[in-house]
Image (cartoon, rainbow, N blue to C red):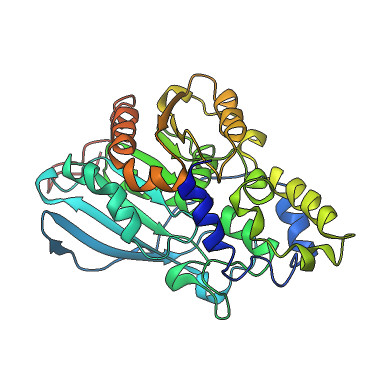
Amino acid sequence: MHWMDALAGRLMSRRPPFFEEGWGSQALLERLSRGPQGFALPELHEVTLGASRREGGLWVQEGRFPSPAAVGPLPTASAEARFQLLLPVKAGPRPPVCLFLASSGDHGFGLRRFLAQPLLAAGMGAVLLENPYYGSRRPPGQKGEALRTVADLLLMGRATAVEAVALLGWLLARGHPKVGISGYSMGGSMAAYAACFFPLPLAVVPVAVAHSAAPVFTQGVLSALPDWETLGRTCGGPEAARQRLAELLEGFSVTQLAPLPNPRRAIIVAARKDGFVPSASTLRLLQHWRGAELRYLQGGHVRGLVAGRSIIARAILDAFSRIEDLQLPEEPPEGAAPG
């Protein structure tokens, strides 16, 4: 484990614990644990985009839409999705676009704008989706990113995946010829999960990614964050709670889903000394996506985020080079009769 990960773990252990209110709705847990049933590509019909504003070499727009996630009762504060669209001024109105999902604790858009900067400089656009339960979508009473129940965690993950898939489809419908998805840590795991449901060509670059949240919350640095005493009160003690949580989270594993139809478009990026994500978990994803490429960041989980930006950007650009432009039908000339 890299020393920066060990230090981060000690600092995080002083913050409010996860799951202070226990497991949450048993009925919701059972429904979510059954996995996606008859998943259909969600469409966005009510996207509201604010006016474009210029920030240096970028056009920036804020967007929002009612969450299409119908997997459970999202809190009122989370019911409307929010995103930021960044397009390089010199790239034209419809460049390729990569969707970035948030890592744990990544409220707002600043960290992902930092990660996306080399791509924006190279002429690629970026969309930054704010997760349910994060930032402006955080329910009243939630302390930072410390979700109050396990059901909240599962609902956040499933809803984020549905919203991500819907946004990718919306980008293609707008005329962007190529789309991709990426994220760091939790964002990488959610990106990998969402990618499995997208039926069209997609560049996929999950970074510092686990095949499931189970080893992250039960083995890595973050295993100190759950309120094991509270969880254990209804299932036989802390160790029994740890086992039950692992079983629930394994049900949301990427390896429980069908492999990507073309894993060659996926580049997995791992940190060599990751204290948050066990290396065996990343390798399980690689084995499931046979044909995907594995690249490494030097150092651990925290250092990889700080110092690995250029490697991450290179992986995303390379993954995009492996997909063809989507051939959209040309619009008829103005005034022409419809065929």
Judge by depth and name the residue closer to the eye, 47 or 18.
18
* Quadrant assignment for the N terminus: top right
Q: Is residue 280 left or right of residue 128?
A: right
Q: Picture quarter containing residue 48? A: bottom left
Q: Does residue 71 appear in the picture of this structure?
A: no
Judge by depth and name the residue closer to the eye, 16 or 99.
16
Residue at (78, 68) in percent of width and height: 230
Q: Position of residue 115 (x, y in %)?
A: 31, 48
Establish if 76 lies above or below 220. below
Judge by depth and name the residue closer to the eye, 5 or 211.
5
Establish if 31 lies above or below 23. above
- What is the number of callouts on the image? 0
Residue at (58, 80) in percent of width and height: 141
Q: Picture quarter containing residue 9? A: bottom right
Residue at (51, 71) in percent of width and height: 144
Q: Position of residue 117 (x, y in %)?
A: 23, 48
Q: Does residue 224 appear in the picture of this structure?
A: yes
Q: Is residue 103 left or right of residue 156?
A: left
Q: Is residue 213 left or right of residue 67?
A: right
* Quadrant assignment for the C terminus: top left
Residue at (75, 62) in percent of width and height: 228
Establish if 75 lies above or below 304. below
Q: Is residue 170 left or right of residue 198?
A: left
Establish if 89 lies above or below 255. below
Q: Residue furthest top?
A: 291
Q: Residue furthest bottom?
A: 140
Q: Position of residue 316 (x, y in %)?
A: 33, 35
Q: Position of residue 31 (x, y in %)?
A: 74, 55
